[in-house]
Amino acid sequence: MVTAVPAPKTTGIVLAGRTSSLTDPAELKSALDGVHQAGMPGVFAEVRDAGQVWRGASGVADVKTGRLIRPDMRQRVGSITKTFTAAAILQQVEKGRIQLDAPIGRYLPRLVPGERGKEITVRMLLNHTSGIAEYLFTAFPSLEKYPSLPDMSPKSLDDNRFRHFGRSELIKMGLTAPAVGKPGGSPGVYSNTNYLILGELLERVTGNTAEEYITRNVIKRAGLKHTEFPTGPRIKGPHPRMYEAFYGLIDPPRDYSVYDMSWVRTGAALVSTMEDLNRFYGRLLAGKIVKRSSLTQMQRTVPVYAQSGEKIDYGLGLLEVKIPGCGTFWGHDGTVWGAATMSLTRADGKRQMSVAMNLVRWNKPDSSGKPQPHPIDDALSTFKQRALCDNAGSQD
């Protein structure tokens, strides 16, 4: 196991709702316990199906004190933030202030000058086909040798814990780095730089900070009560500690729940709850955050290489996931130092799962530097099948 954890302790709640095909709550509880037993300090989730809601938690929020984790806790949700940012951009498209296929240089000529500004469109930023590189390897120089894991170091994680980055500073890092592809090329390459540029675009066309606009027009429109951009390095409200294993280089895993999130901003800084995430994606897919025509644009996917090297189907701030025997799901996942979150909603909006964990990068590498499978991987896959598939028991 990556870290020593006490025996599983779980809360499981089924809230009142009409009869539905929601998986047996006992199976969900057992599957969530399995993630904890496999080595995850704490995991919590909410599953919805056509009016019925299950919330559960297993393990601890703090490995030192044994404080139990709860299903209503707040979590840093990482790149799930991108869906919120994309929805805000689409709202401005609806108002005629932004055109999806217009060059970004039309709006931000000083930020993205020259040929790049003429060739890269707003759509390319949203779906990661801009060819603009990731800035993280400059902001966190000890990550430069990724994915040659044995040569990496966690030093930058500690050095930057209280460092406050300016958005333009980070964007410059990404723009200065060698391009990872041609504008509009396929497959695209996932880059947080794209979504920081989109934050600048929001500010230019709305006259407000991107965080203010998203809060007022996306978060509040969705009726979310526990979702916000952090204003300091600490999370407000009840939350778990966040343990970073960094592929075994940090042993025991270190707590990074206190961290200045200026390093990701409109790309991955949001704090939320699993209840709020399910509500958000449910309302988004129902056409209540952006118009149906805008949602159609968001669901036009292209192949994109994720930072893990995996090829994914990516739209405009939305990830498409097809699960054989279960259906097509839309949502996003997110990882920051010490925390991982995933939120998926079936295309019809009826089946939903949001799950959060307080340990990340638990896979230790082999001698070649390739991260190896861990029991947590299988346990998490089992929980996702139980949560999203009525016939989970028959899935491979």
Image (tube, grey):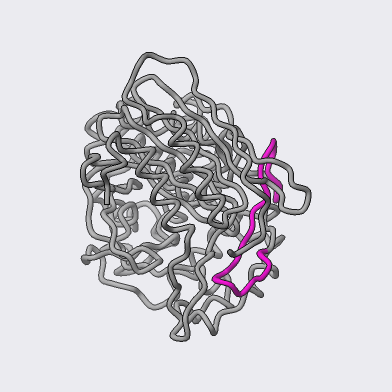
Residue 303, given in percent of the width and then of the height, sits at 23, 59
Q: In the figure, is residue 167 to the left or right of 80? A: right
The residue drawn where x is 45% and y is 69% is 174
Q: Is most of the magenta stretch helix, strand or loop?
A: loop
Give whichever of 384, 256 is nearer the camera. Answer: 384
Q: Indicate yes or no whether the magenta region holds residue 252.
A: yes
Give whichever of 269, 324 is nearer the camera. Answer: 324
Residue 84, given in percent of the width and then of the height, sits at 43, 40
Total numbered circles: 0
In this view, the residue farthest toward the right is: 65
Residue 46, given in percent of the width and then of the height, sits at 48, 33
Is residue 12 positioned above or below 110 on the image? above
Is residue 297 positioned above or below 264 on the image? above
Is residue 19 positioned above or below 64 on the image? above
Q: Tell me which corner region of the image, top left, top right, bottom left or bottom right, holds residue 166.
A: bottom right
Q: In the figure, is residue 279 to the left or right of 323? A: right
Q: In the figure, is residue 394 to the left or right of 223? A: left
Is residue 297 positioned above or below 39 on the image? above
Residue 324, given in percent of the width and then of the height, sits at 21, 46
Q: Locate the N terminus by quadrant.
A: bottom right
The residue drawn where x is 45% and y is 32% is 218
The stretch of residues the image draws in magenta is 232-253
Give whichever of 274, 295 is nearer the camera. Answer: 274
The residue drawn where x is 53% and y is 56% is 38
The residue drawn where x is 31% and y is 31% is 285
